[in-house]
Image (cartoon, grey):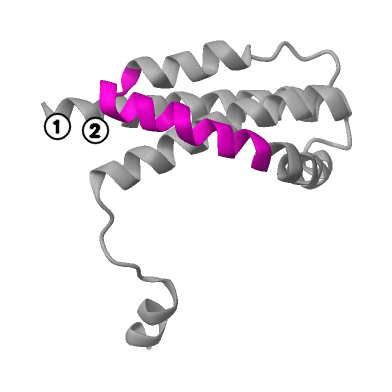
Amino acid sequence: MTLVLCMANCGGAISREDELGMLAGSYAQLCSEMYYLKQNHCPELQVPVMLQCLTEVDRALSVKRSNEFKAGMKFLQQRFAQELPAVVSQKFKIALPRNENDASKTCFWLAQDNAAQRFQKLQTIQTLEKKRE
């Protein structure tokens, strides 16, 4: 049984570069999700400025990785524009009943969860970059 589960879910170890790339992309996605959350469900939210979000990640990365991140963001922004409205709507739809069907409470909860995830990802990026030195 373990072998079957592993064959279905276990991948090879990923490199630090790949992990940093996934974390940086995920951080950018979380920032973008806040924009779509405000635009479609929560007009009262104060969302992070996208440029500031990207700068936070950029500053945490080495120069080489920073350049790769900037180049990759061009592709990611196109993907976000296509995929995130549906992703955010689904997250809102799932969270709404958990928050007593109160839209304001749901918006606040999603914003807090998003901020916590961004903080964790940024901390992990900084930690991985420091290990490299």
Residue visible at 73% across and 37% down in the picture: 81
Q: Is residue 121 left or right of residue 129?
A: right
Q: Is residue 79 left or right of residue 55?
A: right
Q: Is residue 126 visible?
A: yes
Task: Determine whether, in the image, residue 115 is placed left or right of residue 21.
Answer: right
Numbered label tally = 2
For the N terminus, the image quarter is bottom left
CB atoms of marks 1 and 2 within 8 Å: yes
Prevailing secondary structure class for the magenta stretch in the rendered image: helix
* 96 in magenta: no
- Residue 39, x across and y down, in percent: 84, 24
Q: Which mark is residue 128?
A: 2
**Residue at point 54% right, 29% down?**
28
**Please, is residue 19 above or below residue 53 in the view?**
below
- Residue 76 position by quadrant: top right
- Disc 1 is placed on an element classified as helix
Looking at the rendered structure, the kind of residue marked 2 is Leu
Residue type at mark 1: give it.
Arg
Q: Quadrant of the C terminus?
A: top left
Looking at the image, can residue 120 be seen? Answer: no
Which quadrant of the figure has residue 108? top right
Label 2 Cα neighbours within 10 Å, binned few <14 / some 14-19 / many ≥20: some
Is residue 69 located in the magenta-colored stretch of the structure? Answer: yes
Task: Determine which of the numbered discs, if any, sits on residue 132 in the image.
Answer: 1
Coordinates of residue 27 in the picture (x, y in percent): 50, 31
How far separated are the C-alphas under marks 1 and 2?
7 Å
Q: Mark 1 Cα within 10 Å, few/some/many (few <14, many 20+)?
A: few
Residue at horizontal 36 percent and vertical 77 percent from the top: 6
Q: Which residues are magenta?
A: 60-79
Closer to us: 74 or 61: 74
Residue at image x 72%, y 45%? 83
